[in-house]
Image (cartoon, helix red, strand yellow):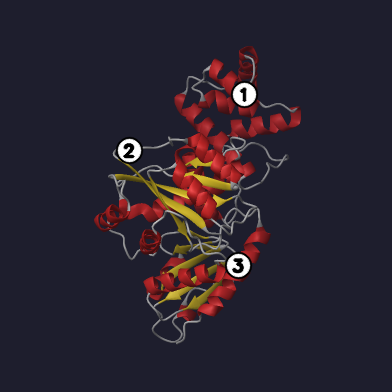
Amino acid sequence: MKDNFDLVLQQMRTLIVSVKRSAPDIQADTRIEMADDQDTVCTGVIYLAEAGQAADWLAGAYVQPASYLLVANVTEAGQVAKLPACHDMTVVEFSCPLSTLYNRLTKAIAKRFEKHAVVTPGADAQQQDRLLQLWRQIRSRTMQGTVEIQQQLRQLCPNYQPYVRLIVVVPDEQAKREDWTAPLQQLRAAMPGCCLFLNKDMVDEEIVGFQFFDRQTFGVIENEANITAALKQNKLRMMVSNSTRDYGKLNTLYSLTRRTGLVAERLNLQRGERIYHYERYGMYQIIDLCTQRYMSLFSHSDIMYLVHPIVVHLTRYDESHRTNLRDVLFYYLQNSQDLKRTAETLYMHRNTVANKINQIRSICSIDFEDGGLCQRLLFSCQVILYYERVLQQRLSRNEEPRNS
């Protein structure tokens, strides 16, 4: 059996075109993933699986259109033909082991799409190559042990500490970068303690970085103003994970961090934002994962069944009366029902916010002393914001608010 990598590369080119045309499909982020416990097989993603595991995985997954599955370690004719029929998925079989398939595929993609070799003055080219090789081993899961990964990073990164967080830098959604020399230099200067390297295994290349700490760290990044300026100048965005001591889960941490940028850019919570902290968008990540599971179970994306009727009612009231009561409710709950902080967040007078809260009370009869209800309403506001901005859907006007 011959492994046709040229065919895979041709499919990659077809996939890139379809992904660009399918926007705003939120699943289309052109990445390679190991097929394991995902409930949804997403559009625009290339999955890799062992032949012996592919059947069980596909049997329990909801397959979206234009997805790809590369099956490794196929040992007999007709083995792939026995997989569950998925007409919306392209399946390609290989006889080589899964780790070999991943490494050969990513190298082939890098060679095909790399237009300019990156030479960074002052950087140790051998260290960069070793970091990229280590990253390939982590991503292909040929290296999963915490101790083993730590030992490698101790040798490669002079600022190694027990805790690590990931930095991922990608081009703006409508931009494409061919030469990474300048941004790599600028970011290394602005983040001297961060071990940055160019990940050539993505179709649209990216910078990945390991940042080390002696304690748990989240939501804070030093020299943020200079980093933001460098990102803006080069039309880049940065995603920042929380820190962890479990180096064996860096694969999971990367996938969550990478997804943060896709969700955050659609949400647009802060104009001009270029550094997306996972912790700020963590709740929306939970909603995002919940939505994928919801779609796999019910075969539709109407997640309004998860939203409290009060928030649905306020949304429709705002649309009919051109008010912003739902936003006021959201920020009032987010600011622990503090009128002053809510007014500052919304750039309103304190009395205006108080009047709007009284109006919400009269329309919906909310008991703000009920902590459980307030938590449910806050979460519902986040779900509907995700529904509108990420899924880019709107509430139907002719439906009544649903019971929870």
What label sits on residue 381 in the rendered view?
none
Badge 1 vs badge 3, beta-carbon distance below 8 Å: no
Identify the residue shown where x is 29% and y is 57%. 152
Left-right relation of 348 to 223: right
Quadrant housing residue 95: bottom left
* Distance between mark 1 and mark 3 Cα atoms: 42 Å
- Asked if one can make out residue 88 in the rendered structure from this viewpoint, the answer is no
Pointer 3 residue: 15
Picture layout, residue 53 above or below residue 250: below
Picture layout, residue 133 above or below residue 293: below
What label sits on residue 216 in the rendered view?
2
Pointer 1 residue: 346
User: For the residue marked with disc 2, what is the amino acid?
Assistant: Gln
Numbered disc total = 3
Identify the residue shown where x is 68% and y is 41%. 395
User: For the residue marked with disc 1, what is the amino acid?
Assistant: Leu
